[in-house]
Image: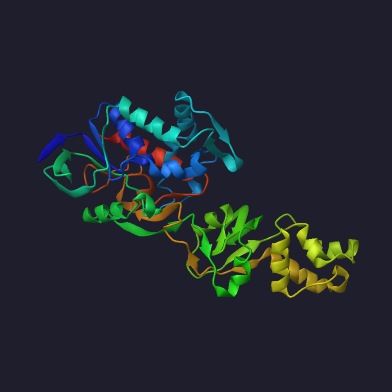
Amino acid sequence: MNGQAFDAIVLGAGAAGLMAAAVAGQRGKRVLLVDHNPEAGRKILISGGGRCNFTNLGTAPDRYLSDNLHFAKSALSRYTPRDFIDLVEAHGIAWHEKTLGQLFCDGSARQIVALLLEECAKGQVRLAFGEPVSHIDYGDGLYRVMMAGTRHTAPVLVIATGGPSIPKLGASGFAYDLARRFDLGVIQPRPALVPFTLGEDEALFRELSGVSTEVEVHWKKAHFREAALFTHRGLSGPAMLQISSYWQHRTPIQVDFVPDAARGWLVDAKRAAPRQTLRRTLAERLPERLADALLDKLGMAGELGAQGDRALVRAEEALRRWAFTPNGTEGFAKAEVTAGGIATAGLSSQTMEARKVPGLYAIGEAVDVTGWLGGYNFQWAWASAVACGRAIP
């Protein structure tokens, strides 16, 4: 059965899809917004502990991963965190800044979803939620989208269905399957901002489940200084989630457990208080359970004065360059986002339109642009969506 003709059909009612539909609708375009979930913005609702970390004041292109590190520059420069803050404030939503430029709602993430739905309503966007797409084809300049036995058409199709992270919310690789059908390249998707798992040889650290401490973690040239959390399966916390986006399987990460300590601090501590124990000295900088585990691994105990200076220097270096080799991650089930995705080489950085497929656009997490933890991925969603919504003819 034939349905309605639209100017654009947007697939996916997450952050990017809602924003793109709203922008295009408010430009007078007839827009259909489709999602197989019965409600919009399911990932938004769980983000930021339910308060939605909706952007980051430190947004810059170098905070994103992509095969083309320049691709995100155009969209991010044309729709900034201040632009989204203005929208939030126009809707009367109170917000606050946490650490490292992260902005959150004072109330609930539902306020951001309500904002986006109100913006869609202003643009008279037609909503079709809880209706899975059964078939899509293209011909004679029109995309034909079949759902619930009805075929809708439009000269523009926007892929905003995200990646497969958090499948329990209905996430899948639908975007990549669709992109491949239209001969768009796909960079191998992988879990990002995801906890690490450790093998049996690191069982001692898995027994520290719940212990958290500030560290500086390194993988090749990437490094982050934030909290690390030991879990019953391995390593988590902001520092580990950040470095996981860069990490390659079966390679070591290096952890500095004493990033604030001056060089030679253990030898200096020995000079100042030779009768003090190593355990107490380390516990002044680290949680006691972690201090015990590290000293156990180092095979060291007793008073500082009983240790040779060289042994203390070696211990200090070990604490600064502690190597963990994760045996994997907790996968897409626990990943906050997906790295990789639809290759930027086939897209316009100005409009998000496919270079060789007229009227086909890809935005948000579906694209091979992945931000750091802390609101960066939402800002990419808003920016790429606005670029797309403004470009739809």
Residue at position x 44%, y 28% in the image: 87
Q: Nearer the viewer, residue 384 or 221?
A: 384
- Give percent across and percent down for residue 176: 29, 55
Is 6 positioned to the left or the right of 380 in the image?
A: left
Is residue 79 depicted above or below 306 in this figure?
Answer: above
- Give percent across and percent down for residue 252: 56, 68
Is residue 226 depicted above or below 329 in this figure?
Answer: above
- Quadrant of the rendering where the C terminus is positioned: top left
Q: Is residue 263 visible?
A: no
Is 103 positioned to the left or the right of 260 in the image?
A: left
- Give percent across and percent down for residue 10: 27, 40
In this picture the colour scheme is rainbow
Q: Is residue 321 visible?
A: yes
- Give percent across and percent down for residue 63: 51, 48
Is residue 298 depicted above or below 242 in this figure?
Answer: below
Q: Nearer the viewer, residue 386 or 374?
A: 374
